[in-house]
Image (cartoon, rainbow, N blue to C red):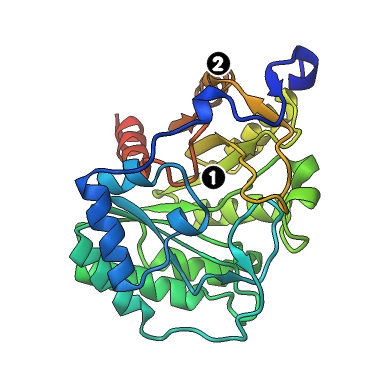
Amino acid sequence: MSVSDAETLRKGTHKPAWLKIKAPGGERYAFVKNKLKTLDLHTVCQSARCPNMAECWGGGTATIMILGDVCTRGCRFCAVATGHPGGTVDAGEPQHVASCVKELGLDYVVLTSVDRDDLDDGGAAHFAAVIAAIKRERPQTLVEVLTPDFFGRRDLLNLIVQAGPEVLAHNVETVERLTPSVRDRRASFAKSLDVLRLYKELAPDGLTKSSIMVGLGETEDEIRETMLALRGVNVDIVTLGQYLQPTPRHLKVERYAEPADFARWENMAKELGFAYVASGPLVRSSYRAGELYVKGVLRREG
């Protein structure tokens, strides 16, 4: 039965109570926030207006956005600025990021980036250099990467794998039917699945991960089909969260899923064989990423 048939998603434009959060605070949050400002780092936590900054920063995890803060693609759900970086790359960024991670004492770092279609390799070599620098400066820090598609090229994806991150993530974002209206035209559901397939082929012992937003008009059957597609390319970890409209010019929320829906999807994902799943209204790609990694590994090894 589809979500629309079952009426299991709440219609309306007003945020329900379970999407309201307290203002971020706490000593560790303040420390990380001030350090990031001082160190001149871009975080997707701030750029994408993530509601979980305090929780993640307080737990020793941060998501750092490299390769600038201007994306060459224009996905209709994303708050990151779109434009033309003009082929510029900060050659000092790998060491700068690594030094910052060390100074912040991060136990787990998620590296992501804007799309850089203006670069021949999409920024893959630079991305790999940042990973390598972190491993060199603070070997105990676990690194998760949430990468662009790098044009779906195996050689570029292999550069990322060879740098040695613990988790390889790439997001399908939404169900296949909605992809053309939600994501930039240069992205595709099939390409994203291929990226995840290649990551697993290149790093069979590594963990792969993807994320699904709900509330854009997808059906229950489509959510299940998307999970099946991810399991079909051996994705280990999946996250599901509510899409929230970042500004009036972005896609509107079609429906708000209730906590019970997220609980049902979590059970569905577990039944389909994911090593670990995070499913909830405020869950985002890198939400409690360190915990997902540890639990995913423990479950696989157990």
Residue where numbered disc 2 is placed: 260
Q: Position of residue 246 (x, y in %)?
A: 61, 49
Q: Image check: 16 left or right of 209?
A: right
Indicate which disc residue 210 carries.
1
Indicate the amino acid at tag 1: Ser
Q: Indicate whether 126 appears above or below 202.
A: below
Q: Amino acid at mark 2?
A: Ala
**Tag 2–tag 1 contact (CB < 8 Å):** no
Q: Answer left or right for 121 relative to 51.
A: right
**Which of these two is toward me, 162 or 65?**
65
Nearer to us: label 2 or label 1: 2
Q: Residue at x 58, y 78 (%)?
A: 121
Q: Quadrant of residue 3?
A: top right
At a point 49% along the width and 35% down the height, the residue shown is 282
Q: Judging from the image, what secondary structure is the residue with disc 1 in?
A: strand
Quarter of the rendering occupied by the N terminus: top right
Does the rendering let one see residue 33?
Answer: yes
Instruction: Give how far apart the Cα atoms at labels 2 and 1 are.
Output: 22 Å
Q: Position of residue 196 (x, y in %)?
A: 57, 51
